[in-house]
Image (cartoon, rainbow, N blue to C red):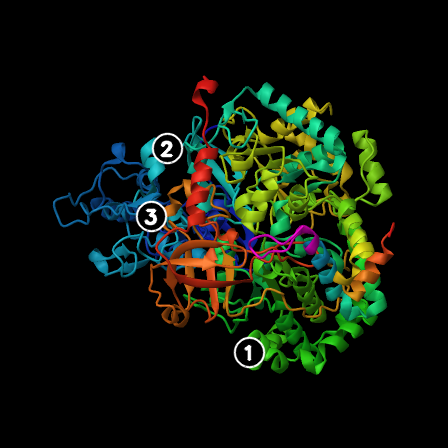
Amino acid sequence: MTFTRETDHGTPPALAAGKPVTLTIDGQSIALPEGTSIMRAASLMGGSIPKLCATDNVASFGSCRLCLVEVEGRNGYPASCTTPIAEGMVVHTQTERLQKLRRGVMELYISDHPLDCLTCGANGDCELQDQAGAVGLRDVRYGYDGATNMGQAKDQSNPYFDFDPSKCIVCSRCVRACDEVQGTFALTIEGNGFSSKVSVGSNNDFISSDCVSCGACVQACPTAALIEKKVVEIGKPDRAVVTTCAYCGVGCTFRAEMRGEQLVRMVPWKDGKANHGHSCVKGRFAWGYAQHQDRILNPMIRASVDAPWREVSWDEAIAYTASEFRRIQAKYGVRSVGGITSSRCTNEETFLVQKLVRQGFGNNNVDTCARVCHSPTGYGLKTTFGTSAGTQDFDSVAQTDVILVIGANPTDAHPVFGSRMKQRLREGAKLIVVDPRRIDLVRSPHVVAEHHLALRPGTNVAVLTAMAHVVVTEGLANEAYIRARCDWDEYQDWAAFVSQAGRSPEAIEPLTGVLAADVRGAARLYATGGKAAIYYGLGVTEHSQGSSTVMAIANLAMATGNVGVEGVGVNPLRGQNNVQGACDMGSFPHEFSGYRHVSDGATRKLFEDAWGVPLDSEPGLRIPNMLDAATDGVFKGIFIQGEDILQSDPNTHHVAAGLAAMECVVVQDLFLNETANYAHVFLPGSTFLEKDGTFTNAERRIQRVRKVMAPINGHADWEIVQLVANAMGLGWNYTHPSEIMDEIAALTPTFAGVNYDALDTHGSLQWPVNAAAPEGTPTMHIDGFVRGKGKFVVTDYVPTDEKTGPRFPLLLTTGRILSHYNVGAQTRRTENVAWHPEDRLEIHPSDAENRGIKHGDWLSLRSRAGETSLRALVTDRVAPGVVYTTFHHHTQANVITTDYSDWATNCPEYKVTAVQVALSNGPSDWQEEYADQARRSRRIDVEAAE
Amino acid sequence: MAANEHDMMSNLERLVYMANQIAANFAILGEAEAITATAHHIADFWDPRMKANIRAVLEQNSASLTPMARAAVGQLPGA
């Protein structure tokens, strides 16, 4: 495959589909929507008007004067980027006069640009170089002896890209990309005229500026002024493969630009329907973990977790794994083993792991990491709407008038969608934030929330019910919608419940800490502000009432008629890239793929016929139940693919005890993660770059993952599971993941129309994809809810039993930061540690002062579950009485979190833990013991390996 | 099994806690409906051993269950 750039039409498409306008460009007639620029029109015709300051992901700017054209009947030479097409217009893009003008402009640019093309990192991939050729520049009459901007110092502070001001042509593309696409406003043009230059605000360099390293500026730069260090180091790519990011649930598509087998850079793909050519620091740059020296490339086994690892052949590792599971089942029973699928793996891989458990182990003991994040979404939305997924696509936000964000931090955890959201807010949409912490969205450049309900952790249901109280008692409910779309009797029961005086904003104010007036204001805005959409995250689900909160959200949306069209809806922002897919694929212990309960005889027969074995009709164990059963001595073996439950799951002591009680723990992963400390078999996994498959993002969008290099561990993950299955006698014979998807489609009605050919044709498809919707379903519940009538569920506020008191007076809540991903296994092995080298404890100044704590002090953080240490970050982002930390590093924040969980799903209550904080001298005894144990556990017996 | 050194619930205590928690969240439906809903929820989401263990609690230490949870466990098949 040869390397070609994506076509850049110079300016974005017309804002709305205007009426068609017919014009003539260079003798050819074309009809395009009103509002299209001449530059774009010419490009769409296959032509190319020279340009430098124009690029089609930011608004036209008209500064470079290179794109001049002639329009018959008009004076002068208008810039084609800023001139809209008009009916009957006759345009000439290539005339002798234009060529002369353009050469003159280019001459000025080149007179102040280094002529080091042969040694420049962008040589052969430089728009300035290309355009100099396009305008036929052969000489610079001004010479190079005058004043220039050349010879300025490079800013190499960012770990991923360099800024060389000498090569900057001050086209402002980087500034506009930062403003318009990313919405950070970190860059500006300082000075004017000859001395104007790109500046990173008042800071001296990129790394200490507000820049979030999303890469939009680098992508926009037409020269080598902003260039990836990897391009400088490796050289220009020679091929590109479109694939899907393996980080968060936005599911950005990228061009993996390669030079041979070496990945040079990941460039966000403009045709990607989730990201439209944008990216964040993780997907764009933080892929170095794939080649990190910590990766384990050979299978290993050991008889005891106290012994060092012994490298073995794949045959030995697989045979040992199969024999151990069979031995354990023979000794302890069919239900004594199980498996965990991963939201970081593909649909095909998770499908195979749950098939291995159901067909091979003969039970339903399979669960997935969604247990600890979005399992309440599955329960809540299936109960109320009839399907376990969000209602909209991401593009829907462009139609939204009121955005309600609850328990989510999109600019950190889903940054590319966070930028889309900010674009809409800058266009005038209103924002309500419900979060104990002042997330960036509450106030950022050109974005201010109308309401920030900084509720006490654990009171989501009370606040949402109070909002519903306002909607119903103030007559703001959409009765016509409810009568047509929902069960009216259930609505009346619900309306009577929320209307009770005890549910009013005034009544719950002492409980939630939110002023009643704010709740009333937010409810009125949500109900009356136009199209209103709710976006939520783990601050909703990871509570003892996570499922109730999801249903309370659904109630509010139905009551106001905000489901079933573009611009509205209930939208769970999924944490990991394939949370939606892992859930869709039957990873939960009570249901097959497509969310069909294992007790349903017809569904079970479908799978029994396909797989040739009887299947268990009883639900299996969820992850926390597996650990309980293990410490009870009846659950003895587990196959864990791409999960690190010792770091990610709550109550670390209990997780460790559960793992330690098992006789065979198999970990399939890239690295010797924390869970592997207790493993007996390690099967090296492959990265997303090394395999084919699909991921399904938060908008139900199924997208291809394409192999860009051979797996350096020898096998793609699906192949490894197949080896285990066949060693257990299951006789699988998949030769490509497309065949696994064909099986999924045959067994799963919502995936009936999905296959790799269709995905390649459409780019991506949003399920349901079936005969009724062969091209997928961007918006759900348009003509009615999947379950029939929408179900209002009365969600009583039941306070968590996790209480503050004299011993533990503060509430700990946890979250994520932009530069890291989940437990940090990948991002800690990249340069992203430059931004966030350690977890810190955010504590309010008044709480800090009461304890004599200063910024940067070491603190002990203690709950009834355990104790750890980390350093302080004193900030009023958190309210008094609340502390906050991330869980990306070896702080092991989950040694603090407890065993309380969501009543319906056992999703852990990560967001509410009563703690005490005090000054300490450094890492706790437990942390040091843990580190020592981990070191011992990771020993590899080199002699045995040799 | 006793609670551990970290003042956490034992496995059996946690199982009872979960049953009571489910019943508490359905309680708003009224007693009869809440009991049925709790029983269905346990039937739909708990594995056979968990169901057997909670049925054993009903027989041996039913006081640890709230009245509604107790009635719901009593409705489970095999109880």
Q: Can you see residue A143?
A: yes
Residue at 81% in and 29% down: A612
Which numbered disc, 1 or 2, marks the residue that appears first in the sequence?
2
Q: Can you see residue A123?
A: no
Residue A460 at what x, y percent from top left? 61, 68
Please, what is the three-letter code of the amino acid marked with disc 2?
Lys
Report which residue position mark 1 lands on: A518
Quarter the C terminus of chain A occupies: top left
Q: Does the magenta stretch include residue B6?
A: yes
Q: Give the range drawn in magenta.
A: B1-13
Main secondary structure found in the magenta portion? loop
Rendering quarter of residue A121: top left
Residue A314 at what x, y percent from top left? 57, 21
Residue at 59% in and 64% down: A802
A337 vs A534: above or below: above
| Distance of label 2 from label 3 (alpha carbons) | 32 Å
Q: Is residue A222 left or right of residue A290?
A: left
SS for callout 3: helix
For label 1, the crowd category at 10 Å Cα-Cα, with few meaning under 14, some 14 to 19 and many 20 or more, is some
Q: Which of marks 1 and 3 is in front?
A: 1
Report which residue position mark 2 lands on: A236
| Distance of label 1 from label 3 (alpha carbons) | 60 Å
Report which residue position mark 3 lands on: A98
Q: Is residue A338 left or right of residue A941?
A: right
Which numbered disc, 2 or 3, marks the residue that appears first in the sequence?
3
Please, what is the three-letter code of the amino acid marked with disc 1?
Asp
| Distance of label 1 from label 2 (alpha carbons) | 54 Å
Residue located farthest toward the top when viewing the structure as drawn: A946
Q: Do the residues labelled 2 and 3 touch (CB within 8 Å)?
A: no
Please, what is the three-letter code of the amino acid marked with disc 3?
Leu
Q: Do pointers 2 and 3 mark residues of a single chain?
A: yes
| A708 or A890: nearer the viewer | A890
